[in-house]
Image (tube, rainbow, N blue to C red):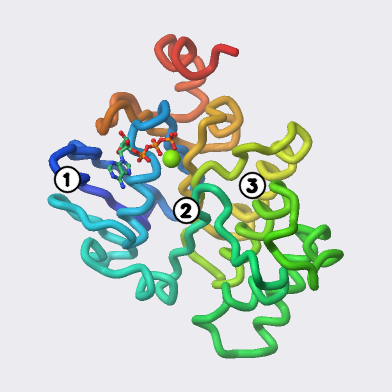
Amino acid sequence: MAAILEVKDLQVYYGVIQALKGISFEVNQGEIIALIGANGAGKTTTLQTITGMIPSKGGSIIYDGQDITRMPGYKLVPMGIAHVPEGRRVFAEMSVLQNLKLGAYTRSNKNEIEETIKMVYERFPRLEERKNQMAGTLSGGEQQMLAMGRALMSHPKLIVMDEPSMGLSPIYVNEIFDIIQEINKSGTTVLLVEQNAKKALSIADKAYVLETGNIVLSGDAKELMNNDRVKKAYLSE
Ligand SMILES: Nc1ncnc2c1ncn2[C@@H]1O[C@H](COP(=O)(O)OP(=O)(O)OP(=O)(O)O)[C@@H](O)[C@H]1O
Ligand SMILES: [Mg+2]
């Protein structure tokens, strides 16, 4: 299988503190890859480095055969990378529909944009019901749906998601994970960061476990679910 994303020996610092200590991993086209780990392990840092929001000190990021290590975020969206950031950052003072349209800023074909809005509304009927509501007044779960819907508007090849289930009630959690699987089945590769290791491993093909800036375990997601170290650290309730 061809790798759509190859991260090699990635090193990131915040001042003198090294948050990523040379991590390497691959995401194959069509897969769901989960990145799990405790608070502060470096998961968000990894996604933000890939999406050009923070610079790396060493290592490389290859996407679709191109070196994107030093590429700024705004260049990556038209190349097919979309980011659902941690903490559902939506534009609070804009309506749901305006938020969605902003997600399509790299596209110009109006009919295609309309089609994508329809697709997003089919996946998230709640967003259609509330299309004229200010995004800042949506509930937490609805804002999470909007953040995902907005990312889908760019018609991405690769979507990276940071804790999509954070703060959601159990019903919403299940719904969000179903939708992630649907997005993947429709052809989008998914790199998923999650605290909810159980759910993430249950839908992922492969997974990587991050501890204080290092990848300490990797493999088939279903096998990792049965790994004693993973069970003890991430799956006990
Ligand atoms: N802007 C920053 N300045 C200084 N240190 C930072 C900054 N952002 C993150 N860090 C530190 O880098 C480390 C990794 O943080 P990161 O946000 O990547 O963790 P995470 O795995 O996403 O954690 P969580 O599960 O809590 O979201 C942490 O120790 C954090 O305190
Ligand atoms: Mg994080």
Residue 160 shows which numbered tag? 2
Foreground mark, 1 or 3, reads 1
* Kind of residue indicated by mark 3: Gln
> Horizontal placement of 130 versus 134: left or right?
right
Q: Quadrant of residue 69?
A: bottom left
- Tell me the residue that label 3 is attached to: 181
Residue behind label 3 places its C-beta within 8 angstroms of ligand 2: no
* Kind of residue indicated by mark 2: Val
Nearer-the-camera pick, 200 or 145? 145
Say which residue appears at 49% left-offset and 81% top-offset.
Answer: 106
| Number of residues whose C-alpha sits closer than 10 Å to that of mark 2, classed few (under 14), some (14–19) or many (20 or more) | many
Q: Earlier in the sequence, mark 2 or mark 3?
A: 2
Foreground mark, 2 or 3, reads 2
Q: Earlier in the sequence, mark 1 or mark 3?
A: 1
Nearer-the-camera pick, 155 or 169? 169
Secondary structure, mark 3, is helix
- Tell me the residue that label 1 is attached to: 15
Nearer-the-camera pick, 3 or 75? 75
Task: In the rendered view, tell whether residue 107 sits above or below residue 18.
Answer: below
Residue 31 is situated, as x and y percent measured from the top left of the image, at 49, 48
Residue 139 is situated, as x and y percent measured from the top left of the image, at 74, 50
> Horizontal placement of 119 versus 48: left or right?
right
Task: In the rendered view, tell whether residue 196 sits above or below residue 133.
Answer: above
